[in-house]
Amino acid sequence: MGPEFTPERVAELTGLSASSRTAGPLPPISTPIVVNERGFAWLPNPDPFVGIFGNPIVCYVHAGIRLGWAPMPLPAPGGVLLTLFGGLRAEPGFEEEGVATFITREGLNGLIADLQAIAASIAPPASDDQEGEG
């Protein structure tokens, strides 16, 4: 593991992560997003520590995600290794990328809260409003 996995560094990063959540629920991306015909999107790179979105990055837009996790008690007790990959394999010739990150229980709870806030902000499909009728 690299230098970022010392207990001191993890404590520092955990504190930074917690402080980035003091502004309330995660807002939606406010800048235009461009998606080309091959499924690549130009997205602003979020920087929660300064409250702005940085230089655009290019990502392949997948349908869904593949999630994995494993207990990872080091560098801090109660942590997990969390992996996220696109739901389906990427286009041929595109190197599949994912994220593997150490996250504490507190960080995981924050991520869950962010996802719940996103879900709550999305209007349900019209068909959900009509369930049970008929």
Image (cartoon, rainbow, N blue to C red):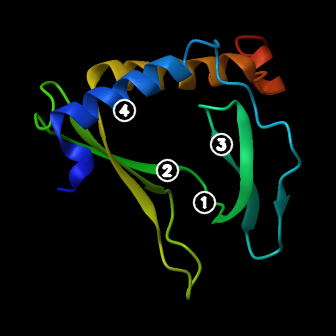
Mark 2 or mark 4: which is in front? 4
Residue at position x 64%, y 16% in the image: 25
Mark 4 or mark 1: which is in front? 4
Task: Estimate the x, y position of residue 56 in percent, counting from the top left.
Answer: 74, 58
Residue at position x 86%, y 43% in the image: 31
**Relative depth, front residue between 133 and 112:** 112
Q: Which residue is mark 3?
A: 46
Does residue 30 appear left or right of residue 120 in this picture? right
The answer to the question of whether label 3 and label 2 lie on touching residues, with beta carbons closer than 8 A, is no
Looking at the rendered structure, the kind of residue marked 4 is Leu
Neighbor class of circle 3 (other Cα within 10 Å; few <14, some 14-19, many 20+) is some
Task: Estimate the x, y position of residue 19 in percent, counting from the top left.
Answer: 50, 18
The answer to the question of whether label 1 and label 2 lie on touching residues, with beta carbons closer than 8 A, is yes
Circle nearer the N terminus (1, 3)? 3
Neighbor class of circle 4 (other Cα within 10 Å; few <14, some 14-19, many 20+) is some
The answer to whether any part of residue 9 appears in the image is yes
Q: Which residue is mark 1?
A: 62
Circle nearer the N terminus (2, 4)? 4
Q: Which residue is mark 4?
A: 13
Looking at the rendered structure, the kind of residue marked 1 is His
